[in-house]
Amino acid sequence: MPINTLAAALVLFLAAILPAASQQPGNGNVRATHGAWSIVCDTPAGASSEQCAMMQNVLAEDRPEVGLSVVVLRTADDQAEILRVLAPLGVLLPNGLGLNVDGKDIGRAYFVRCFQDGCYAEVIINDELLATLRNGESATFIVFQTPEEGIGIPVDLSGFGEGFDALP
């Protein structure tokens, strides 16, 4: 999913915001739950206002040591929504992160940055992706440890649409 230069700069800017909060678990307050998704709000250090994100933490069914944090957030200027996935360190970065929804290949998101807590892949949520996630039952995010070995990690999409609509 291509993104333009302005959006790419915005995504990199936002990548600096959420990791700081994610490295301090327990700082966010769960504001609401929609199906499998929670809306978590926090005021990061140095921020003038509270920031909220919709998120779900998941583990691979056959590899419990491999997990993801899937986060949806709205940019501060309300111009875009971002799907950000935190994958564990040790994943093969050039292959990116695959996404299937209800058995259909949706595409790949590429990793933009790694921190001590893992590596982040993210995309701007366009209308087509939003409709796919709203109408889907389950998604599978695929991380690679070798070029040939993909690990599918299921994500429950129940409540995605309601949570997205409730995201401040």
Image (cartoon, rainbow, N blue to C red):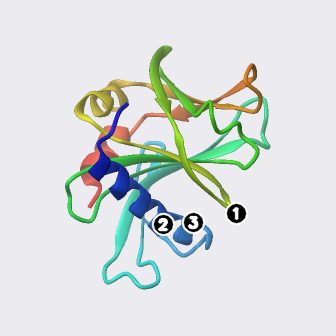
Whether residue 15 is situated above or below residue 4 in the rendered picture: below
Q: Which residue appears farthest toward the top when viewing the image? A: 103
Disc 3 to disc 2, C-alpha distance: 11 Å
Q: Position of residue 36 (x, y in %)?
A: 48, 43
Q: Position of residue 37 (x, y in %)?
A: 45, 47
| Cβ atoms at labels 3 and 1 below 8 Å apart | no
Q: Which mark is residue 22?
A: 3
N-terminal of the pair, mark 1 or mark 2, is: 2
Q: Which mark is residue 116?
A: 1
Q: Position of residue 86 (x, y in %)?
A: 58, 50
| Cβ atoms at labels 1 and 2 below 8 Å apart | no
Disc 3 to disc 1, C-alpha distance: 11 Å
N-terminal of the pair, mark 3 or mark 1, is: 3
Disc 1 to disc 2, C-alpha distance: 13 Å
Q: Residues within 10 Å of mark 3 (few under 14, many from 20)?
A: some
Residue 139 in view of the camera = yes
Q: Which mark is residue 16?
A: 2
Name the amino acid type tagged 1. Gln
N-terminal of the pair, mark 3 or mark 2, is: 2
Q: Say which element carries label 1.
A: loop
Q: Position of residue 159 (x, y in %)?
A: 38, 40
Q: Nearer the viewer, residue 19 or 43?
A: 19
Whether residue 79 is situated above or below residue 65 in the rendered picture: below
